Amino acid sequence: MFNETLPRTIVDFMEEINELAEEKPEWLEIFNNSFLDTLQNTVKPLTDNTTFVLTGDIPAMWLRDSTAQIRPYLFLANKSPEIKQLIKGLIERHFLLIKLDPYANAFNESANGAGHQDDDTEMQAIIWERKYEIDSLCYAVQLAYLYFKETGDHSIFNKTFDEGVEQILKVWKTEQNHEHSSYHFQRDTWREEDTLVNDGKGSPIKETGLTWSGFRPSDDRCIYHYLVPSNMFAVVVLGYLEEIYESYLEDDSKSHNIKLLKSQIDQALKEHAIIENKQGESVFAYEVDGKGNALIMDDANIPNLLSAPYLGYGNIKDDIYQTTRKTILSSENPYYYEGEYASGVGSSHTPEEYIWHMSLAMIGLTSKTKEEKAQMLDLMVETDANKKTLHEGFHKDNPEEYTREWFSWPNMLFCELMLDYFDFKLKGAEI
């Protein structure tokens, strides 16, 4: 979209950031590369006035990733008609795709049959992958809400949006009792994280009021299918929807139903998701099953426990968040690694001892101090393998060993952290 002449508003914005960060040229190299790369190489306006956003080196669009990739451009939505339209186009496309299949997480640009068409689930040619993840639906609502808060433009709350929301609410209510769900997923693969057990229905759970997720935001299957960070995110975006339907769409009936679902999930989090760590302190579990089983861990992919206040669940000052944070940034989290070059959180999705740049960005975004934010920006620069771009995971003792050459999401999280360091705050997303 912006491969030739950049709109003046984008140039002005980047010049402003370059002046603010002139004493940090190493930050600016990654910021300037990333901010332009996502616009110039991942964003594609389509003929139906919607927007397709490539995740990077995989030729598909994730609902989750595309929201995170676009989020820093919200600061320009009121200044640049071009940016405003591409965000509106993405919101429209998100809800068109959710109407088509709310259980799918990643989509092709067209119905070209690319992706995992051999999976045992209800595939369509436009779907790249159909791993059901709560957060995919959350992110679509989040982008719509934050766009509205920044611009005041409620034209996005149209028929497509309303019908997409209906599908989201239907899925989340259905999945409060997964036994009533028709969703199943199996893949013929050596990698057990890519398929669900129990004939594609997942491991047994007990009804709690929480809503079920097949997979984590890493696209790896859940062990216990009440994924706590994603249920937290659902509570947050249900609050957004309650506000939208009560104050702007004036649909009291739907607003009431949304409020009830939000209350059920939030109450279930308080009753079932708080457990004790090794020190006997109260912390949030990562996953629970309602039968007494729970995981103390965190994964670098967002939503995670580390990101709860960033997403709007609770506050960084909350005691239970700080205790959870301390626990997951310690050896009690099996995916927390400390090495010669860095310490941070990895994922089951990548090899052991690989730290994700996204986890470093989130440590910074949820920090109370500018000093720690700066430390994380410095650390991300120091572990970029001299590529001036960020990656998925890198080895804790050797950043030259990394996964994914081109991954737009961590690039834009770096931009977001840098903007946050210089006190750029999105309306409706205060931490």
Image (spheres, rainbow, N blue to C red):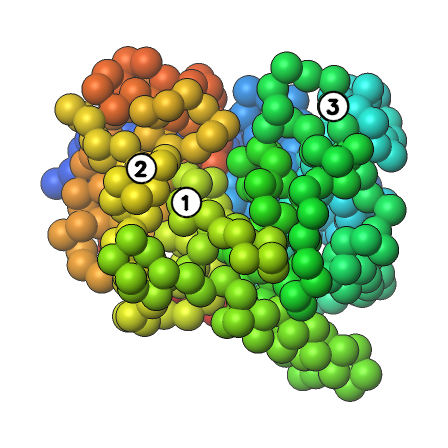
Q: Which residue is mark 2?
A: 336
SS state under label 1: loop
Say which of 5 and 162 sits in front: 162
Q: Are marks 1 and 2 in contact (CB under 8 Å)?
A: yes
Q: Amino acid at mark 3?
A: Arg
Q: Are marks 3 and 1 in contact (CB under 8 Å)?
A: no
Within 10 Å of disc 2 (Cα), the crowding (few <14, some 14-19, many 20+) is many
Residue at image mark 1: 298
Q: Between marks 1 and 2, how big is the CA–CA gap?
A: 8 Å
Question: Element at badge 2?
Answer: strand
Looking at the image, which residue is at 23% across and 42% down?
Answer: 376
**Front-most of residues 310 and 187:** 187
Q: Residues within 10 Å of mark 1 (few under 14, many from 20)?
A: many
Task: Say what amino acid the circle numbered 1 marks.
Answer: Asp
Residue 38 visible to an observer of this rendering? yes
Indicate which disc residue 187 carries.
Answer: 3
